[in-house]
Image (cartoon, grey):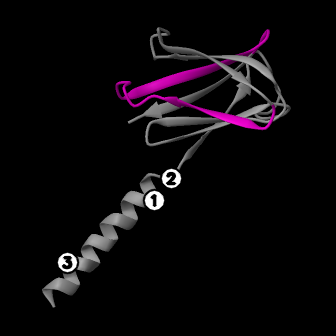
Amino acid sequence: MNAKFLFTALLSMLTASTVLADPIELRIEKEGSTNHPRTGVPITASIESGIITTNVSTYSGTITVTIKDEDGDTVISTVENVSANSQFTTNVTSLADGTYTIYYTLGDTVYYGEFEKE
């Protein structure tokens, strides 16, 4: 009887942690635009377990990825060479807990999204 209770409790804990680990979609918008989010945005992003996965739909070329903290200080900056229908990842596990903004610069166009690191 105790083994059954322990297994049930363990299964409940595993299920709860799985739900919490689901990816969170980042809302990506064009900087300076009053358009609705994702309207014509060639990238989408999600974060799961400290890894941001960015999907590129129609853009080919260089993307500069910049992550800034709440004070506006740059904490991560990388350059990715991408092609249409590709993806890349950005590791943010080393960042302190807090709110961050990720910027994607594609040529002279900037897209951004906000995320929480916990």
How far is disc 1 from disc 3 in space, using C-alphas?
Answer: 20 Å
Q: Amino acid at mark 1?
A: Val
N-terminal of the pair, mark 3 or mark 2, is: 3
The answer to whether the residues at label 2 and label 1 have Cβ atoms under 8 Å apart is yes
Residue bounds of the magenta highlight: 84-109
Q: Which residue is mark 3?
A: 6
Label drawn at residue 22 = 2
The quarter of the displayed image where residue 84 is located: top right
118 relative to 6, above or below:
above
Secondary structure beneath label 3? helix
Query: Which residue is painted at 44% across and 51% down in the image?
Result: 21
Q: Amino acid at mark 2?
A: Asp
How far is disc 3 from disc 2 in space, using C-alphas?
Answer: 25 Å
Report the side of 13 relative to 33 (left or right): left
Residues packed near mark 2 inside 10 Å, few (<14), some (14 to 19) or many (20 plus): few
Q: Residue 72's spot in the image, x, y percent?
A: 50, 10
3 relative to 26, above or below:
below
